[in-house]
Structure formats: structure tokens, C-alpha cells
Amino acid sequence: MEGVIHLDTLYLVVKYPHLDVFENWYRYAMNVDHRKLKEGIVVGDFVVKGGASAYKFSLWQHDARVFLSDQVDDKIGEGKGIGIWVQLGPKFLIHHVYNLHDAVSELISAIGVKQQYPISISRLDLAMDLFDVEMQAQDLNFWKRGWVGRSKVSGIHFSSRTGVLETINIGSRKSSIYLRIYDKIAQATKEGDIEYWRDVWKGFEGPVTRVEWEIKPRRGNFGKDLQDFHLFTPGFSVIELWNYLLNWGRLCTPNPNDSNNRRWPDAPLWAELRAFAASHAAGVDWPMSRYGKQYQGMSEAYIKFVSGVISGGMARFNHEDPSVYGMLDGLEKNGESLNKIQNKAEKKAKIISRL
């Protein structure tokens, strides 16, 4: 199986307690006809548009959207504010795959937030784009009979133009995990993004089916490293998170001789997904963490990640006699002094202590 694995959507909440950022931008949105606001007003590097729910307006910059509200701690009481809501789409995430934290910091700074504040993850979408897998070839009855998990097939959509199967939904969008399997070619064509995705797919021209998990960490039993953006560190292997998602629910081949569907074997498609995730995710340097058990406030994956980085650094800086001291000396020679590292740690410790 060939395809692409990527982080497709990321929603963040910046716990910013003050009114100043809202007031600075609101002067451009106030007293503006809602139809004009719907089209957008260009202000510097942003386009000011309408808001959503308690967020009165939003600032758009390419595939990043920032929603602002006056319902902050300064106005309604400490701990009661809803903060700043940031929505990052796939174009932003794919472009900044190796510098996500810096890109988010620059975005937040550009709207007027000049200090670091706690940032929580309210939603993230992980996607597998599968080449040469046709959505219309999927057997709907097989999915209904063979799907094993806490959630069930909850929605089916057919093309209004051709009548062919386009989407299978599993679970509820209100739950911690929601799964969509859909015809990515049809969706991208409809949204006018097909050429962008062809480029991401390195020019692949055939059918593409997307398997996409929508995860809301605060609604599920996920570790702190998947809820706190500051702990959502680039370099994590995502294989264990994929393993969890692929076991949260799975497509099986029904065994009429076994009434316990948990013992049913993976269907060929699901077995291929496991192999695809294993072969790709382990080497992908994405900013993401895993669902896992907590150990002194850190997941097992985080412990393994730190251990792997340290051991790798020791080996790279002196492969003949690897040691922590040799690694620190190598970092010093490359501009990363111990004092510099200590200063970074102190800043991050202050952020973590406020969570």
C-alpha cells in the first residue's frame, strides 16, 4: 500500500487572559456590515472576518484562523475566560511540519500576544491518504458487519451527481474519536484544492481514499502530552498513537464460527493500514505525541523519546566513546551552550507550572 500520512487539522486554545488583543483588532470589525465582514477586510497580513459562537470575529492568514473573544479572565473572572481559539489547516501544518511550534509562536505574536501562555489542544485530525484505493469499491454491508469497536457506522453519504459511495462515518463528532473514510479526490475537487493535493501526493493521478481520525483529547483518556501543545514535541514517533487508533475500532473479516467478534481477524484493508502506519510513521518527524499511561506527568512515549534523543546525541557526537559529557561538549561547539539550554528549560518550566 502506498500513500501519505499527515496531520490534517489542529485546533488550539491559547489561555490568554487579557482584553488588549481583542480590543486592538475589534476596532476594525465593529460597526462593519456583516456581509462585508463575511467577505473579509484586509488589515496588514490578516483578513478580518466574522466569528463563531462566543468568538466575535476572526483573523485569517492563509490556512490559519485565529478567533478572538471579549470573554476573557480580565472581564469575567480568573479561570473563566475562553481564551484565543486557533484553527490550523493542512496547508499550514504540512508547510510547517518541521517548525510547528515556532510557526504557531510567530502567528500568535503577530496578532499581539508577546509572551508565552499555556496552549491546549482541543482537536487534531490524523489522516492516511491511500493511493489506488477506490471508495466506491468498498462493500458497505461488509463494513457494517465487520466493523468491531465501541462506535458503529453512523453515517453514509453518496454522491448527489453519480450516486456512488463517497463517505462512511463511524462514531459521533461529540465523542473523543470520530472516524471518516471518504473519497479524497471527490472532496478536493469539490473544494477546488485538487491541484494542491496532487502536489502533496507527488503527482499521483489515480483514486485516493482518505482514512481520517478526528481526536478531541480533553474528552478522552489521553495523556498530558497530547493535550498540552508545549509538550507536543516534534520528533515523536507516532506509531503508538496509530496503534491505538487502529485498535480503537477495526474492520474485521467476520467468522461465522466465532460469536466473539473481538477474535475476528483484521480484514485485508485494515491489515494493510497497520503495515502502512508501521512502515511510515516510525520515520516521520511530525509534531505529535501518543495516547499513553502517565509516569510522573509524562507518558511512556515521552520518556522513550527523551531517552532516544539523548542516546542518539551521545552516539553522534562521539561514536567511538559516547558519553553525556561528550554530547554536551558537542552542543557547546555548535552554539547550544549549557546555559542556553538551561534558560530554555526554565522558560518551559514556568509554562508547565501554570497549566
Image: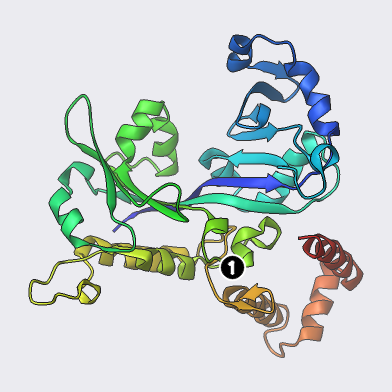
Give the structural element (helix, strand or loop) at label 1: loop
Q: Quadrant of the C terminus?
A: bottom right
Report the side of 190 relative to 350 (left or right).
Answer: left
The answer, for residue 99, to whether it is visible in the render is no
Q: Residue furthest left?
A: 257
Amino acid residing under circle 1: Gly
Q: Is residue 276 above or below residue 292?
A: above
Q: Give how far across and how far down residue 175 sits, in percent.
A: 45, 53
State the colouring used for the structure image.
Answer: rainbow
Mark 1 closeness class: few <14, some 14–19, many ≥20 residues within 10 Å:
many
213 or 26, which lies in front?
Answer: 26
Mark 1 = which residue? 223
Q: Is residue 341 above or below residue 161?
A: below
Q: Is residue 260 above or below residue 78?
A: below
Q: Give how far across and how far down residue 305 sits, in percent.
A: 62, 74
Q: Give how far across and how far down residue 86 sits, in percent.
A: 65, 40
Report the side of 9 relative to 337 (left or right).
Answer: left
Quadrant assignment, res 252: bottom left
* Residue found 41% across the figure and 63% down from its top: 245
Q: Quadrant of the N terminus?
A: bottom left
The answer, for residue 162, to whether it is visible in the render is yes
